[in-house]
Amino acid sequence: MKSLFMSILLLVSFGYSQDALVEAKPEIGWDSLKSLIVYPEIARRAGVEDIARVSVEIDSLGNVTSIDFGGYGIFGNSVKSTLRKIKWIPEMYNGQKRASQIVFDVQFQLQEKKKFPTRRMLMIESSNPVVRKN
């Protein structure tokens, strides 16, 4: 009776672990990925900061197939070039690797903010709206 109970328990726990969803992640880990993304020098000099939303599509082999970057374009090349270089551990469902999409934020924040000299600024006002595409 005891062995029957243990067998059922093992089958139930095995079945549960097989149904679990494991999200995709970088093979090198999130901290290592963070350290590879370069803060663009032009953005650093200008004092520009941003929080960018990044969406990465990964195939079942762990290759990046598409990257959507939602932030200031000045940071886009740095993020995209880094993400294309790394390998991903694909999403697992029911023990099978599958293509997936992972969405995360990348924050660009300066440790030391420079004080820029105050300058005169000419403000031009218009009744026409400004349209910006992201």
Image: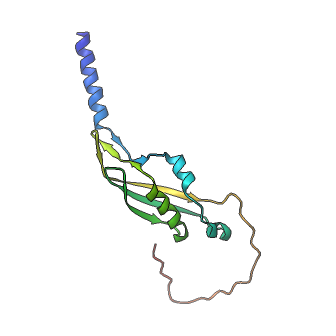
| Residue 98 drawn at (x, y percent) | 29, 48
Q: Nearer the viewer, residue 13 or 129?
A: 13
Residue at the image position 60 percent from the left and 62 percent from the top: 39
In screen coordinates, is 129 left or right of 120? left
Residue at the image position 27 percent from the left and 16 percent from the top: 6
Q: Quadrant of the N terminus?
A: top left
Q: Nearer the viewer, residue 65 or 21?
A: 65
Q: Is residue 97 above or below residue 75?
A: above
| Residue 46 drawn at (x, y percent) | 66, 71
Residue at the image position 55 percent from the left and 70 percent from the top: 74
| Residue 103 drawn at (x, y percent) | 42, 55
Q: Residue furthest top?
A: 1
In screen coordinates, is 88 left or right of 5? right
Query: What colour scheme has been applied to the protein in the rendered image?
Result: rainbow
Name which quarter of the figure residue 3 lies in. Answer: top left
Q: Residue furthest right?
A: 117
Q: Nearer the viewer, residue 124 or 114?
A: 114
Figure disc tally: 0
| Residue 2 drawn at (x, y percent) | 26, 10
In screen coordinates, is 58 left or right of 123? left
Q: Is residue 27 above or below residue 115?
A: above
Residue at the image position 65 percent from the left and 66 percent from the top: 44
Q: Is residue 52 above or below residue 15?
A: below
Q: Is residue 4 above or below residue 97?
A: above
